[in-house]
Amino acid sequence: MMEVARDLYRRELLKGSTETLLLSLLLGEAMYGYQLVKEMDSKSSGYFRFKEGTLYPALHRLERDDLIAGKWQSSASGQDRRYYYITEKGRTKLASMLEEWNLFTTAVNLVARPSGN
């Protein structure tokens, strides 16, 4: 039962962090969907496991809001893939999101782990 509750909590945390995580990955380089899934899994040591039902709606929202842009390209194998790039607006938004994240986590830690008690 405790594990189920933890998994639900983890999903809620991920839901609120998905866009920040995706923009952060795209800051380094343009990537296609499956590459984003693998990179997220790798960089988080398996903590974040995106499924198509989470990934593609988030990418479409980011693209609709002009935070990323997608472009079809042929790969070396000849398969067309849609690569996503962070836009200048996306870079600005990410900087703001990360600043807020730092304020939020600091405040949570002050409450959850007060020093001197």
Image: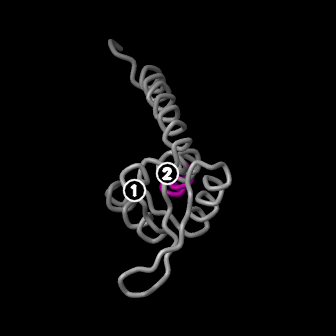
Q: Nearer the viewer, residue 25 or 107?
A: 25
User: Residue pushed farthest bottom?
Assistant: 78
Q: Which mark identifies residue 76?
A: none
Badge 2 amino acid: Ile
Q: Quadrant of the C terminus?
A: top left
Q: Is residue 109 left or right of residue 93?
A: left
Q: Is residue 30 magenta?
A: no
Which of discs 1 and 2 lies nearer the camera? The answer is 2
Seen in the picture, residue 6 relative to 46 is either above or below; the reply is: above
For label 1, count other residues whose C-alpha is less than 10 Å away and answer few (under 14), some (14-19) or many (20+): few
Residue at 43 percent of width and 64 percent of height: 31
Residue at 41 percent of width and 53 percent of height: 25
Q: Which residue is mark 2?
A: 86
Q: Position of residue 88 (x, y in %)?
A: 51, 43
Q: Is residue 2 magenta?
A: yes
Badge 1 amino acid: Tyr
Q: Is residue 70 left or right of residue 105?
A: right
Cβ atoms under marks 1 and 2 closer than 8 Å: no
Q: The residue tagged with tag 1: helix, strand or loop?
A: loop
Residue at 55 percent of width and 49 percent of height: 19
For label 2, count other residues whose C-alpha is less than 10 Å away and answer few (under 14), some (14-19) or many (20+): many
Seen in the picture, residue 64 relative to 16 is either above or below; the reply is: below
Q: Position of residue 17 (x, y in %)?
A: 53, 46
Q: The residue tagged with tag 2: helix, strand or loop?
A: strand
User: Residue pushed farthest top?
Assistant: 116
Q: Position of residue 5 (x, y in %)?
A: 55, 52
Q: Which residues are magenta?
A: 1-10
Q: Which residue is mark 1?
A: 47
